[in-house]
Amino acid sequence: MINLLPKDTVFYDLFEKLAAHVVSTSEHLRRLARTYPDGAGEHIALIRQEEHDADELAHAALDRLDRTFITPFDREDIHMLVGGLDDIVDTIDALAKRFPLYHVQAIEPAFQRQADTLVHATVAVSEAVHRLRKSRKLSELSDKLIEIHRLENEGDDNNHAAVSKLFQGNDALYVMKWKEFYDLIESAIDGCEDVSNTLERIILKNG
């Protein structure tokens, strides 16, 4: 049976804006990693602002979800998608705050590679989110979902190599600090795959 009641398309605007913040936040982190310590305070402040703006969008989306009778797809899936996107931004913000807190002197080259992987993953996530507005078949998102999964595997490989090298001849405090940085950036990359899984579930349920 065809549902003649209009569905609230403003949700798609909110998803896409939130995804844009995900990309922008990851790009600020990559610039921070590439130029550190030059301009570190500015990049950290920009990431903090992105996190604040993303939180406001997430709250707006969830408030609209509470007030809307007809939604584009299941409420649980909207909640998962919004939360997943916001979690990526939160993780990057938590990571960036630790650079001055832990008195980091220089950036590990492996972390810079992970920052590149994260940016590529967030761009793929954003492109997949933009397709959600019009796509009703999994095949219309599959290339982006496959790319996100590939980048998550790449992030795992980068992380294993970086941590292995970290434990070769470094003092315990240095290892502890950088192990946390690597764990956080891997968590952000994993968050991209979590969003990908949510998008796949949405398409399969509503196609």
Image (cartoon, helix red, strand yellow):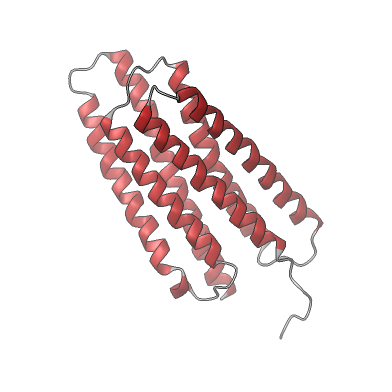
Vertical position of residue 75 compared to residue 96: above or below? below
Relative to residue 1, is residue 199 drawn left or right?
A: left
The percent coordinates of residue 50 (x first, y second) are 58, 38
Residue located farthest toward the left when viewing the structure as drawn = 169
Residue located farthest toward the bottom when viewing the structure as drawn = 1
Q: Residue at x 60, y 50 (%)?
A: 18
Relative to residue 193, is residue 202 drawn left or right?
A: right
Image quadrant of residue 16? bottom right
Q: Residue at x 39, y 28 (%)?
A: 181
- Quadrant where the N terminus lies? bottom right
Vertical position of residue 60 compared to residue 131: above or below? above
The percent coordinates of residue 47 (x first, y second) are 53, 34
Residue 146 visible here: yes
Residue located farthest toward the front when viewing the structure as drawn = 38
Residue 76 visible here: no
Q: Residue at x 37, y 29 (%)?
A: 35
- Quadrant where the C terminus lies? bottom right
Vertical position of residue 138 compared to residue 102: above or below? below
Vertical position of residue 85 compared to residue 144: above or below? above
Relative to residue 197, is residue 166 drawn left or right?
A: left
**Front in this rendered view, residue 22 or 160:** 22
Q: Residue at x 47, y 28 (%)?
A: 96
The percent coordinates of residue 165 (x first, y second) are 20, 28
The percent coordinates of residue 81 (x first, y second) are 58, 54
Relative to residue 167, is residue 17 drawn left or right?
A: right
Image quadrant of residue 3? bottom right
